[in-house]
Image (spheres, helix red, strand yellow):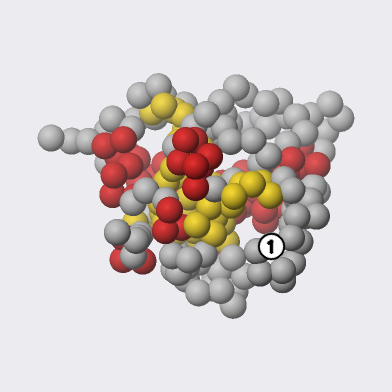
Amino acid sequence: MPKQMNEYLILPIPERCGHEAWQLGLLVHEHSQFPGAHRTPAAEAGNDVLSHAKGKYGELAFHEWLVRQSVAPTHTPFRNDYTRKVLDDDFVVNGLRLEIKTKMRKISSPFPPPVHFNVNLGKKEIEDAIHVFIELSSKVKIVDNPAAIIVGWAPPALIAEKGVRTWPGKESDNKAFTFKRYDWDLNIRELLPPAGLIKAIGGARG
């Protein structure tokens, strides 16, 4: 059955989440510019502080949700030094790596997004992790704590089966534009429902 918008999961927003996300985003941005720093695709593309802050906001909201589900990660992506890559620098729960992909669309885009919208990895290769797709409302600034929802999640096999690989110069199906980067696009309706995520990572409470 196709995913419906009412299946999206609203994330709890910690107090001052936006301000903390902005500070972390600033730290990531500054550290990515250091000589010899880990050059992520985002850093190489010259992403600004806001781009990093959006990602951290999604991670902070997701972490709060885990806490409220009584799930304790053994590793989180929060630290004081981002100049070097940390292996599997994402959430790790019960030995499973969780890659959080956060998107904030244009202010003119509907929120929550319709199920025919796409999400993307933002990377050339599919990482060996459960990918959790979070959307932020663009109606307010990051520092004002926008709403955040999980629209779905996907293991690598699902992305490889249902996703569409893109590359610079590839033309979209509707011929309306060409892609600018290597990536994987995946339709929201193809994602697994958020309700099953806790069980999948071994955090179900009986």
The answer to which image quadrant residue 71 occupies is top left
In the image, taking residue 206 as reference, residue 46 lies left or right, namely right
Measuring 68% from the left and 49% from the top, which residue is drawn there?
166
User: Can residue 1 be seen in this snapshot?
Assistant: yes
Outermost left residue: 206
Task: Identify whether 63 is placed above or below 95.
Answer: below
User: Can residue 60 be seen in this snapshot?
Assistant: no
Measuring 71% from the left and 25% from the top, which residue is drawn there?
84
* Quadrant (top left, top right, bottom left, bottom right) of the N terminus: bottom left
In the image, taking residue 108 as reference, residue 27 lies left or right, namely right
- Across and down, in percent, residue 109 comes to 56, 74
* Quadrant (top left, top right, bottom left, bottom right) of the C terminus: top left
- Across and down, in percent, residue 6 comes to 31, 66
Measuring 73% from the left and 36% from the top, which residue is drawn there?
40
Q: Amino acid at mark 1?
A: Ser
**Element carrying mark 1:** loop
Front residue of this view, candidates 4 and 25: 4
- The residue beneath circle 1 is 172
Measuring 49% from the left and 47% from the top, which residue is drawn there?
162
Outermost right residue: 35
Front residue of this view, candidates 78 and 11: 11
- Across and down, in percent, residue 81 comes to 66, 29
The answer to which image quadrant residue 89 occupies is top right
> Label 1: how many residues lie within 10 Å, few (<14), some (14-19) or many (20+)?
few
In the image, taking residue 183 as reference, residue 21 lies left or right, namely left
- Across and down, in percent, residue 97 comes to 46, 29
The answer to which image quadrant residue 174 occupies is bottom right
